[in-house]
Amino acid sequence: MKTKVSWLVLAASLAVVAACSSQKKEEAPEQAQPTLHEVMKDEIDLHADELWEISNPALGENAHLDPKLMDDERWNQIEQRATALKAAALDLAKLDPIVVVKPGVKIADEGVPYGDTGAEVQANVDKDPQKLRDFANALAVHAGDIASAAQRRDTERAGLLIGQLDGVCEDCHLEYWYPSQKKLLQEYGIER
Ligand code: HEC
């Protein structure tokens, strides 16, 4: 008798939990996920900066990684940071919907010439959110390739990929953060 009652209680509380969680899903899906601005600052820029900080002192002639300046510790750190950057880029690609900033939050370079505001960036994103996810996935692949090159201790390839990383960031920035700079670059014949 005693067990029967507690099963009933359990069933009832499970029903409540189920009702709560389904209600939550309907109410505010975008509350649970970070904004693009948060992923950019707290994950992507952070890990990319750490990666550059570790690799820059090992740059030799012609901005190549100098094998003489590389040791296991530096390789492992590069691999770690590149793997973290890859995960961050995948987090960015997963955002749905993509909310650029919380109300009242300012983004970098707002108000300077050719710097878009958060609302303008949101409009750029809403025009083609899938292409932004494609750029984020391209960054994930690039960062993953850096991690593999580091694992293989491939100075040539790792150096090349780290040198190209900034361009992978810029591809997306020119499209979504400051597209007016893209026009300017095109006017000067410097197309990316
Ligand atoms: C898929 C698109 C995309 C990629 C790839 C990307 N970014 Fe961004 N980033 C944005 C957008 C959109 C903004 C403008 C919104 C903002 O400032 O938060 C931005 C803004 C920033 C900012 C300014 C943040 C602030 O305080 O407002 C920094 C710094 C930054 N990105 C660094 C990077 C670095 C470093 C990389 C490459 C390792 C990178 N981003 C790759 C889309 C991207």
Image (cartoon, helix red, strand yellow):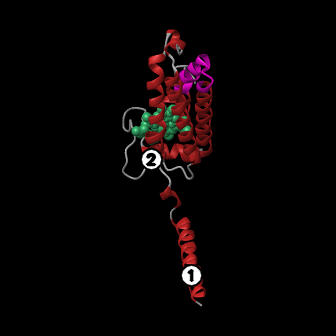
- Residue 142 visible in this rendered orientation of the protein: yes
- Residue designated by label 1: 12
Q: Seen from this angle, which residue lies furthest bottom?
A: 1
- Residue at 58 percent across and 32 percent down: it is 143
- Residue 179 visible in this rendered orientation of the protein: no
- Magenta highlight on residue 156: yes
Numbered disc 1: secondary structure = helix
Location of residue 140 (image quadrant): top right
Mark 2: amino acid: Ala
- Residue at 58 percent across and 17 percent down: it is 155
The segment highlighted magenta reads 150-167
Q: CB atoms at circles 2 and 1 under 8 Å apart?
A: no
Query: Which is more toward the observer, 69 or 174?
Result: 69
Q: Quadrant of the N terminus?
A: bottom right
Label disc, if present, on residue 34 of the rendered structure: none
Q: Quadrant of the C terminus?
A: top right
Label disc, if present, on residue 119 of the rendered structure: 2
Point out residue 121 in the picture as x, y percentages from the top left corner: 48, 43
Question: Main SS type for the magenta part?
Answer: helix
Q: CA distance from mark 2 to mark 1?
A: 46 Å
